[in-house]
Amino acid sequence: MKRHSVSVALFSILSLAMLLTPNILSISTFCATSEETTLTFKTIDAINIDGDVSKDQVQNKIYWNPHSTGLTNASDWNVTFKNEVQILLRTRTGEAGHVATGAWWTTSFKSNTKLPLYTSKPIKLMANFRVNVVTVRYEADNEWLRIALACAIQRSDGSVAYTEMDFWDSPNTLKHPSGNLKFGGNTVYRGGDVVEYKIDQAIIGEWISYSLDLTQYINRAWSLRSGDVLESVYVVIETMGAAVEVKVKVDDLWITRLG
């Protein structure tokens, strides 16, 4: 895909944020309606360094911090960088875990610090990105498979909580009893330190652009309070149970702060 300059991207983001209800800009029957008062923001800043995958291979890998959690050697996964990010995951039956890549405060945030989410002056954190779910294969009936944008926040008491916004889910994922999809809501899962929302069901093989109001989703999930800070924003493929094969491409992941 063609590279866009950061300045043009930020101007576009600001224009959208000023003109549209800032929840999700893609066409989606799952999006939530914003009920918050419209605010005018005078500044907009990109908080991450390499959203457009414009560095060399070594730098891209540092800034995007690809890693897996929970998977064993029975699974194959890799994350590659060539003008865009490509995530590939293949598992065997019985594997459970995830592959993630994105922006962390330790490697990707310009400030090299966790970002306050609750301030005396209103701010808004947005995540804008493009994604292409290229391939999804899985054994039916027993799978938990989802692809999402997720963010981690450190709470004022030191604990960490996760808010996840799914843009592709397998059927079993959407049947979790803690969700409210069958009643017309958009909560896929709520439990422990995770709240998971449904924002879309991406069409396989097509690039889709999203603009998500992270502040709104996090506040809805956890009721923001003084001392809460953002640690990371990343794309994640999570699987449990059945064998799966997934390929996802990501580009132009910019986390911006409006204030």
Image (cartoon, grey):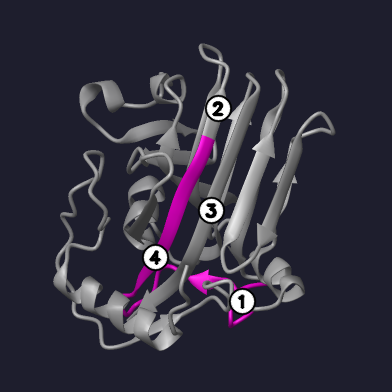
Query: In the picture, residue 121 is in which quadrant?
Result: bottom left
Q: Residues within 10 Å of mark 1 (few under 14, many from 20)?
A: some
Q: Earlier in the sequence, mark 4 or mark 1?
A: 1
**Residue 148, magenta (yes or no):** no
The circle on residue 137 is 2
Q: Which one is closest to the eye, mark 2 or mark 4?
A: 2
Q: Which residue is mark 4?
A: 128
Disc 2 + disc 3, Cβ < 8 Å: no
Q: Residues within 10 Å of mark 4 (few under 14, many from 20)?
A: many
In front here: 84 or 218?
A: 84
Does residue 175 lie above or below 102 as drawn?
above
Does residue 103 lie above or below 242 as drawn?
below
Residue 110, position as x, y percentages in the image: 58, 82
Three-letter code, disc 2? Arg
Q: Earlier in the sequence, mark 1 or mark 3?
A: 1
Q: Earlier in the sequence, mark 2 or mark 4?
A: 4
The residues bearing labels 3 and 4 have C-alpha atoms spaced at a distance of 14 Å
Q: Which one is closest to the eye, mark 2 or mark 1?
A: 2
What residue range appears in magenta? 106-135
Give the structural element (helix, strand or loop) at label 2: strand
The circle on residue 249 is 3
Identify the residue shown where x is 70% and y is 29%: 91
Residue 50, position as x, y percentages in the image: 58, 75
Three-letter code, disc 3? Lys
Q: Is residue 76 left or right of residue 116?
A: right
Q: Which residue is mark 1?
A: 113
The residues bearing labels 2 and 3 have C-alpha atoms spaced at a distance of 16 Å
Three-letter code, disc 1? Thr
The residues bearing labels 2 and 1 have C-alpha atoms spaced at a distance of 38 Å
